[in-house]
Image (cartoon, rainbow, N blue to C red):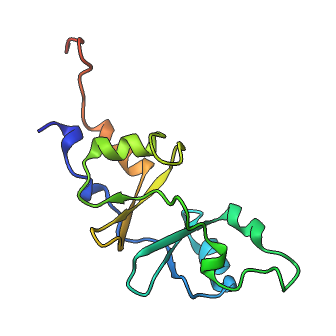
Amino acid sequence: MSFLQSGIKSYVQASVPMIGVDATTQEAVDALKASGYGTVYTVTPEKKLAGVITFCDLEKLSTTDALRPKSAKDLSTDTRVVAIRENAELWQLLKIMNGENAANKRFERIPVVDSDKRLVGVVDRSSLRSALETVQIPLSGSAML
């Protein structure tokens, strides 16, 4: 088995900024400010990934109370949330992070879910970078010196 076929479990950080979908908008904003990621994941009571809140989502906050989102669920992006299963291989994660995904977007971090779509962690680009620096992967047709 090659390095790229190894599982992603050793790169998953279990400490994930998350908030319940029923949390208030203010609680969501506070959690986002406290997050070192600039991202907070919204989860159901069963810890299933429901959405993601980023600083861009704060644009939804209106000064008019009638238009203001009432909960974290209203504030979060819940369509096209890109995640990966905890049993995925490293090459699959790299493809998703580099833009080969439903959103065609590069990601700095990807939420990791179990088979029931419960949020179990997150993988970020910096932890992958340090792992890749420790391994030399020969390119096809190249000679090792």
Query: How many labels sit on residues?
Result: 0
Which residue corresponds to the image point at 28% horizontal and 45% vertical from the top-left? Answer: 90
Q: Residue drawn 88% across and 81% down?
A: 64
> With respect to residue 122, does 8 lie above or below?
above
| Residue 129 visible to an observer of this rendering | no
As drawn, 43 above or below 1? below
From this view, report whether residue 65 is shown above or below residue 82.
below
Where is residue 110 drawn, in percent x and y? 44, 56
- Which image quadrant: the C terminus? top left
Q: Residue furthest right?
A: 64
Q: In the current view of this chain or complex, which residue is farthest to the left?
A: 1
In the image: residue 6, left or right of residue 69: left
x, y (%) of residue 100? 44, 40
In the image, 43 versus 102, the foreground residue is 102
Q: Position of residue 58 (x, y in %)?
A: 73, 69
- Residue 136 is situated, as x and y percent measured from the top left of the image, at 24, 29
Q: Quadrant of the N terminus?
A: top left
- At a point 44% along the width and 48% down the height, the residue shown is 125
Q: Is residue 45 left or right of residue 145?
A: right
Query: 95 or 36, which lies in front?
Result: 95
Using the rendered image of the protein, determine whether residue 59 is visible from the camera's viewpoint.
Answer: yes
